[in-house]
Amino acid sequence: MFDEKQLWKERFGRTSKELSRYLRYIFNGHIVIVLVFLLGTAAYYYQEWLKTLPEPFPVSAVMAVILAILLTYCPIYTFLSEADKVFLLPLENRLSGYFKRSMMVSFLVHAYLIVMGLGVLMPIYARVNEGDFSAFLPFLLIMLAAKALNLLIRWKVQYYVETNVHRLDTLVRYAINAVFLYLLFSGASLIFLLAVGVLFVVLYIYFRARSKERGLKWELLIDQEERRITSFYRLANMFTDVPNLRDRVKRRKWLDWLLGSIPYKQEELFKNLYARTFLRSGDYFGLFIRLTIIGGMAIYFISYGMGQVLMVLLFMYLTGFQLLPLWNHHQNKIWVNLYPVHGGYKEKAFKQLLSAILSLQTLMLSLAVWANGDWKGSLLSLAAGLLFAYVYTHFYIQKRLGTADKK
């Protein structure tokens, strides 16, 4: 006999176990130390920035624009899989309890994000309002109620397969959320808050009535769930091998000129392979771009020289550490081992590519230091970064590659 409670319990337990297993690899000793350093640095500069806030600072508008994103963003974790289109579709009318539990878990996850987001922005509100933190709990409770309505509306919208309906829903809810939060943070009358709140109720009633004659869009729900879990696997794959990861390839034709510079020689085979993999497969190239941009922004807002140099080395380490899975990217492809090329060329090609990537990042981050007006710090960052790139690629990662240098 079918038991939807047992099904949900098994799905939730299996997913939780899978995620916790990979989270242990993600939050290892190295990353925890880096995160503590980054959070400590961010907290210090955040506190210093608060002291420089101008008197007429538009705190209500800023908080509304940012926190409305958290209210509008409403992924619902259903824990569905590809086979459910065949085996659970006939049981759709008996799965209401299953999806209610999924909604509850999704709400708890989003509630945590709202607590974190409001907690980060509340010091700005308190600074403008003479250190008053007493409004935190009322703001939080009202935002959680608004989040629940957003989730209910989003669930009904998922009965539509048309992408324009989903986009319109997102835009409309963001506008309503932003206006609602602005009124809330600016201390508007309760009547205005209730008036905007009624719009949420009207939206929910509208989509609920329109979705009664529609069935669940199983392919849409399964595709959304697979995208979310694939994103997590891609993150975890930066720290350990993930067999369940489905690799995606993007052509990026505009970068072909970089590949054209590699000589067409037998000994350059692995250099060509790793370069193409970095630019086209997985998320290696995107990771490099994101970390470089974030690092550049962080460095630009740090005003003391040695701190900038340390930040350059820190982001280089993060990049180098998270690009290490590139070494094993093709380990399960047997034809790579059939190439008539000496194995020493593989390690040499990987080290050369990683060294070139880190050197390029060093140059870009050093330019961020120079843009901040510290040309001496820029030169010091460039020299320290190039030295780090050499030591990291020729000594530090040697044990991780699991091979000895081949002369």
Image (tube, rainbow, N blue to C red):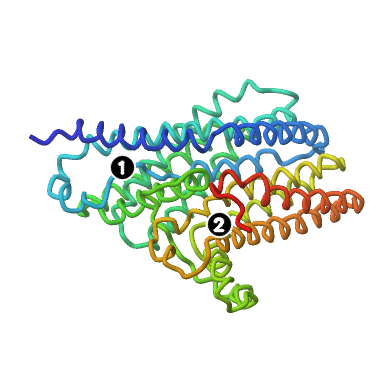
Q: Nearer the viewer, residue 82 or 24?
A: 24
Local packing at callout 1 (Cα closer than 10 Å; few below 14, some 14-19, many 20+) is many
Amino acid beneath label 2: Tyr
Residue labelled with disc 2: 284
Furthest toward the front, the residue is 407
Q: Which residue is drawn at 63% across and 57% down?
A: 351
Are discs 2 and 1 less than 8 Å apart at CB? no
**In the picture, residue 204 is in which quadrant?**
top left
Residue labelled with disc 1: 79
* Image quarter of the C terminus: bottom right
Q: Where is residue 170 in the image (x, y as percent from the top left)?
A: 45, 53
Q: Which of marks 2 and 1 is in front?
A: 2
* 198 relative to 113 in the view: left or right: left
Amino acid beneath label 1: Phe
**In the picture, residue 205 is in which quadrant?**
top left
Look at the picture and state if 50 lies above or below 75.
above
* Image quarter of the N terminus: top left
Q: Where is residue 246 in the image (x, y as percent from the top left)?
A: 38, 56
Circle nearer the N terminus (2, 1): 1
Q: How far apart are marks 2 and 1 (CA)?
A: 27 Å
Q: Position of residue 382 (x, y in %)?
A: 82, 53
- Where disc 2 sits, the SS reads helix
Q: Which residue is drawn at 68% across and 54% down?
A: 293
Q: Which residue is drawn at 62% across and 56% down?
A: 288
Local packing at callout 2 (Cα closer than 10 Å; few below 14, some 14-19, many 20+) is many
- Where disc 1 sits, the SS reads loop
Q: Nearer the viewer, residue 218 or 65?
A: 218
